Image: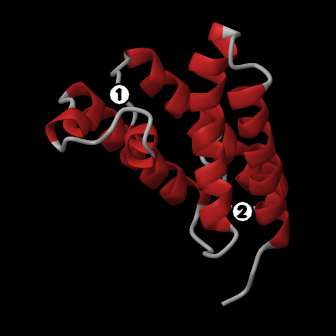
Amino acid sequence: MRLRTKHLLIALLVFAAEILVGTVFADVRFIRSYLSDFLVVILLYHLIKGFRDDKPLTLAVAVFVFSCLVEATQYFHLSDALGLRRGGLLSVLMGTSFSWIDIIMYFLGCSTSCILDSRILSKTTPCIPLK
């Protein structure tokens, strides 16, 4: 297994940005609500890419599907059904409120990661084939 340091560095930088969003910008609703959803899928994408050599489109779709599944648990209030304490680690990771805008932000974040990876970082087959 080969580590891909540029992807791990991006993941680290995005993680730092997520910490800023959760602390410094916690009171700025747009940043807290939307930017954090955009960034979290970028973080997941590059963290996984740091350890695995998946094709950009394959990984982007996998991260998007995973994110949508997590969002579905919010729609069905799974954390409440499981009796998870609000504010606890698992409850925070699963989230508590469903939003279609979150899914849009996941899509935009996954698309951004895929395009950045395929066009700049990996120079592999583009995510969106151009004719």
User: Which residue in the structure is indicated by mark 1?
Assistant: 96
Whether residue 96 sits left or right of residue 18 in the image: it is left
Nearer-the-camera pick, 72 or 104 = 72
Residue 59, percent from left and from top: 52, 58
Q: Earlier in the sequence, mark 1 or mark 2?
A: 1
- Disc 1, SS: loop
Nearer-the-camera pick, 8 or 89 = 89
- Say if 52 sits above or below 25 in the image: below
- Amino acid type of the residue that numbered disc 2 sits on in the rendered structure: Thr
- Say if 80 sits above or below 105 in the image: below
Whether residue 61 sits left or right of residue 45 in the image: it is left
**Crowd class of label 1 (few under 14; some 14 to 19; many from 20; radius 10 Å):** some
Mark 1 and 2 residues: CB-CB less than 8 Å, in contact? no
Nearer-the-camera pick, 56 or 128 = 56
User: Which residue in the structure is indicated by mark 2?
Assistant: 124
The residue under the point 66% across, 49% down is 43
Whole-number angstrom distance, CA of label 1 to CA of label 2: 37 Å
Q: Can you see residue 62? A: yes
- Disc 2, SS: loop
- Amino acid type of the residue that numbered disc 1 sits on in the rendered structure: Thr
The residue under the point 83% across, 71% down is 5
Name the quadrant of the C terminus. top right
Whether residue 68 sits left or right of residue 76 in the image: it is right
* Residue 67, quarter of picture: top left
Name the quadrant of the N terminus. bottom right
Circle nearer the viewer, 1 or 2: 1
- Say if 58 sits above or below 71 in the image: below
Residue 117, percent from left and from top: 73, 53
Give the residue furthest to the bottom. 1
